[in-house]
Amino acid sequence: MPYKLFSDNDLIRNFQEGNHNCLEVLICRHKKSIFANIVKVVKDKQLAEDIFQDTFFKVINKLKAGQYNDQGKFLPWVLTISHNLAIDYFRKSKRLQIVDNKDEYNAYDNIKVFDDCIEDKMITEQIHKDVRALLDLLPDDQKEVLMLRNYSEMSFKEIAEHTNVSINTALGRMRYAIINLRKMVKEKDIILNV
């Protein structure tokens, strides 16, 4: 049976068992969608090619490490990785300083001033979207305490009174909410800082 007829999950399984031809079929199968998505984000074909390569280096490493859950969602998984790499690129390039080779040195010439540019807005929107999605995955009691504390700016005493639990229970729920969020961020490979 030719590899092109295999499902994504069959190709992944065969790749993980050492058949590297299966990865080539996966890349060919999804290259247009992934590349188009990257170009849409970065608006530069050359940069998109670099991010596409970085995406598949990361995909290969994650597949070899067994960090892909075969739920039939290979393409969305790769699109998320590529999108995060594009956002990472903007974050890193934003932090780079401009250096000018002049005869005279002026410290103010090396300071880069940032306006609210499209990249910053994209990063912020993505962070907010990721946080909202993660919050929805928390148990209701943990989500409630976290929302009351961070968005309503209630004290733990007020939260305890509002939810009819002890302060220690409110603190415990907040602690578990943070632990669970950190765990989900790590598992989903999400970057939440600008």
Image (tube, rainbow, N blue to C red):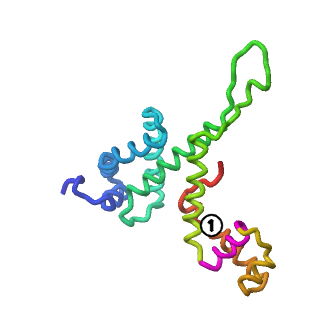
**Callout 1: 10 Å neighbours few (<14), some, many (20+)?**
some
Quadrant for residue 143, please give it.
bottom right
For the residue pair 15 and 91, the one nearer the viewer reads as: 91
Residue at horizontal 35 percent and vertical 47 percent from the top: 33
Q: Is residue 122 left or right of residue 48?
A: right
Q: Position of residue 132 (x, y in %)?
A: 58, 64
Instruction: Name which residue type carries label 1.
Output: Leu
Quadrant for residue 105, please give it.
top right
For the residue pair 31 and 42, the one nearer the viewer reads as: 42
Q: Position of residue 64 (x, y in %)?
A: 44, 55
Mark 1 secondary-structure assignment: helix
In the rendered image, the residue lying farthest to the left is 1
In the rendered image, the residue lying farthest to the top is 103
Residue at horizontal 32 percent and vertical 53 percent from the top: 19
Query: Is residue 104 on the magenta stretch?
Result: no
Q: Position of residue 146 (x, y in %)?
A: 68, 71
Q: Work out whether 111 lies above or below 192.
A: above
Q: How many marks?
A: 1
Which contiguous range is marked in magenta?
140-151
Q: Which residue is mark 1?
A: 181
User: Which SS type dominates the magenta stretch?
Assistant: helix
Q: Position of residue 140 (x, y in %)?
A: 60, 78
Quadrant (top left/top right/bottom left/bottom right) for the N terminus: bottom left
Q: Work out whether 152 lies above or below 53.
A: below
Residue at horizontal 44 percent and vertical 51 percent from the top: 59
Quadrant for residue 142, please give it.
bottom right
Q: Is residue 171 left or right of residue 96?
A: right
